[in-house]
């Protein structure tokens, strides 16, 4: 797919506004077979977006668009060049009925009166489209009303809408985006069922604030085979209305408010912030049959919370028990965490030639690679895990490379090439370090843990989704649950269906989809696919690993040369 997509034709002299069906040029129309068959080597973005070609059949207004103009300069010039059609008198142009960025252009003749034109379409014959469009676009960019005010002031535009109007528009966007989000998740669930009868989902929580004091959090369940969001749950411990009315508790007004507030209350969680993930995952499993008519058979978790334990206790399904799958990225992190904690607690274990930070990183990476490369067999996983450990204690007198692979072991490579006589081992890991870390290897190579690692599952999709949410509702800007709900809806739609999904929200609200908007959305989704596929190449992966390793090495050299200059209590 090319970066730019041109559809329709240019050069038409017609001035009437028409709506045309768009088609992607130079591309074979998809059929059900081509949609079903997605190559296994494709990136997650490619798998998701290449199976959704809804944009090809979208109605686009070829003649709609906005332009910035200097009102006084342009219309003063026009008024000097034209006369009234009826009386040939002079006409002047003024602004009337101003609401935010919307207004009426009044073309007035002293004898014939005024003729008024809206500067943009009206939605529901009342609301200026430009105000709703501006609010939606700014929310997609992670900007609220204060940001809109700054933008308008710096661009010498009129003041945007008032807070009350902004709140009403956000509610409309929430309603529209919720309906589009639900359709997107429903379609994703059908695709997931089509891929595999046993639904495997990965779950992960994210919070507005670090630590366990956050008032807001959200949890997603993503299908393993499609990489699309199947369900999402936003949790809140705070409601602004409840906080306001609490001061009037006991009054007649409070009783009247409380009677009608339950359905609108923003607070839907009680307990700690950490419990949000446990409760949300349980709720989503319990409603899976109602929502998608499916049962989630396996859950991919990170082990950072007691989510799976809570899920088992809740027993969402009567006829079978959900099984646990480990996120192998988090299992690898456990190795690094355990080794670093051991180094801190054991005096004399660290230092030059012993359990250094660099060695811990290497052991953790080798441990993770052993699991990834052998994710189909517990025995193969364990053999390669211990092979990486034995590789580190090997010497010229006692080489221990029996289970090493030629793909990464330099001793094996020398053996294959017949150059073992010239091969020299690097300094081996000291015996006391080996004795100290061996129990950790035994524990993290247990049958039960490695069995849960079969399949090589990760939560990478969940973490990618989380970053999308917080780019739309930045953690640095305070906002309530309503804004987080909107951000979550938009994130689900763009994550599942690409930027083209935003046009579905615009359709529901009544915002016109123009040629400029359509072309950009299609081109951006194409760029996203290309960038994701490029990052999947071995060269790109190697480059990222090398860059990360080089960065750590340079940082270590700087610290060694300068000494520690920053740290807790270092000045005392």
Image (cartoon, rainbow, N blue to C red):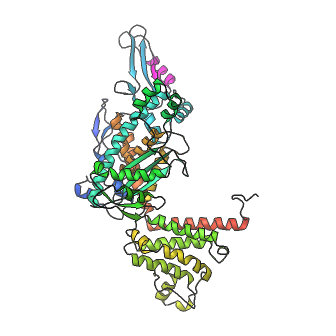
Work out which quarter of the rendered image holds the C terminus and state it: bottom right
Compared across the picture, whether 267 is left or right of 42 comes to right
Tell me if residue 86 is in the magenta stretch. yes
Rendered position, 460 above or below 398: above
Q: Is residue 446 visible?
A: yes
User: Magenta stretch?
Assistant: 70-98
Work out which quarter of the rendered image holds the N terminus and state it: bottom left
- Residue furthest left as drawn: 32
- Image coordinates of residue 536 in percent, x first then y, are 43, 63
Q: Nearer the viewer, residue 116 or 78?
A: 116
- Residue furthest front as drawn: 250
Rendered position, 528 above or below 116: below
- Residue at (64%, 77%) from the top-left corner? 354
Tell me the quarter of the picture where residue 557 sits: bottom right
Compared across the picture, whether 441 is left or right of 18 comes to right
- Residue furthest top as drawn: 111
Tell me the quarter of the picture where residue 518 sits: top left
- Image coordinates of residue 392 in percent, x first then y, are 55, 80
- Residue at (31%, 35%) from the top-left corner? 12
- Image coordinates of residue 529 in percent, x first then y, are 39, 55
Rendered position, 550 above or below 388: above
- Image coordinates of residue 210 in percent, x first then y, are 55, 51
């Amino acid at each position: 797919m090319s970066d730019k997509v041109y559809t329709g034709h240019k050069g038409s002299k017609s001035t009437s506004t028409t709506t045309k069906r768009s088609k992607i040029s130079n591309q074979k129309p998809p059929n059900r077979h081509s949609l079903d068959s997605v190559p296994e080597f494709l990136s997650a973005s490619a798998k998701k977006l290449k199976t959704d070609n809804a944009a090809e059949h979208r109605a686009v207004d070829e003649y709609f668009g906005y332009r910035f103009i200097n009102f006084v300069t342009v219309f003063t010039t026009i008024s000097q060049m034209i006369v009234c059609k009826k009386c040939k008198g002079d006409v002047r142009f003024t602004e009337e009925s101003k609401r935010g960025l919307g207004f009426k252009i009044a073309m007035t003749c002293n004898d014939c009166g005024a003729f008024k034109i809206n500067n943009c379409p009206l939605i529901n014959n009342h609301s200026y489209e430009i105000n709703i469009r501006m609010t939606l676009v700014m929310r997609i960019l992670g900007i609220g009303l204060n940001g809109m005010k700054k933008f308008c002031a710096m661009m010498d535009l009129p003041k945007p809408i008032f807070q009350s109007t902004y709140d009403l528009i956000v509610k409309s966007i929430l309603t529209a985006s919720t309906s589009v989000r639900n359709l997107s998740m429903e379609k994703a669930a059908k695709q997931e069922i089509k891929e595999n009868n046993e639904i495997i989902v990965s779950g992960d929580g994210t919070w507005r604030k670090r630590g366990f004091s956050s008032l807001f959090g959200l949890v997603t369940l993503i299908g393993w085979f499609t990489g699309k969001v199947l369900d999402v749950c936003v949790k809140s411990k705070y409601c602004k209305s409840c906080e306001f009315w609490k001061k009037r508790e006991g009054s007649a007004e409070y009783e009247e408010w409380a009677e009608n507030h339950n359905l609108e209350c923003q607070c839907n969680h009680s307990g700690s912030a950490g419990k949000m993930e446990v409760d949300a995952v349980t709720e989503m499993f319990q409603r899976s049959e109602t929502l998608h008519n499916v049962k989630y058979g396996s859950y991919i978790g990170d082990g950072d919370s007691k989510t799976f334990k809570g899920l088992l206790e809740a027993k969402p399904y009567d006829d079978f028990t959900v099984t646990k799958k480990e996120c192998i990225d988090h299992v690898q992190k456990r190795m690094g965490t355990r080794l670093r904690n051991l180094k801190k607690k054991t005096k004399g274990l660290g230092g030059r030639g012993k359990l250094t930070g660099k060695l811990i990183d290497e052991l953790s990476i080798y441990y993770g690679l052993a699991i990834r490369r052998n994710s189909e067999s517990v025995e193969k996983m364990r053999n390669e895990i211990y092979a990486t450990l034995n590789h580190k204690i090997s010497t010229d007198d006692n080489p221990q490379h029996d289970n090493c692979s030629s793909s990464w072991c330099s001793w094996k490579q020398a053996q294959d090439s017949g150059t073992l006589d010239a091969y020299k081992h690097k300094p081996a890991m000291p015996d006391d370090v080996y004795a100290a870390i061996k129990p950790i290897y035994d524990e993290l190579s247990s049958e039960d843990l490695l069995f849960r690692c079969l399949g090589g599952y990760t939560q990478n999709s969940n973490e990618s989704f989380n970053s999308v949410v917080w780019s739309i509702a930045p953690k640095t800007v305070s906002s309530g649950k309503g804004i987080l709900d909107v951000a979550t809806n938009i994130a689900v739609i763009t994550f599942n269906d690409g930027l083209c999904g935003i046009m579905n929200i615009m359709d529901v609200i009544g915002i016109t989809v123009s040629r400029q908007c359509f072309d950009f959305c299609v081109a951006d989704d194409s760029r996203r696919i290309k960038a994701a596929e490029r990052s999947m190449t071995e060269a790109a992966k190697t480059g990222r690993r090398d860059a990360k390793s080089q960065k750590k090495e340079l940082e270590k050299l700087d610290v060694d040369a300068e000494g520690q200059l920053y740290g807790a209590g270092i000045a005392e």
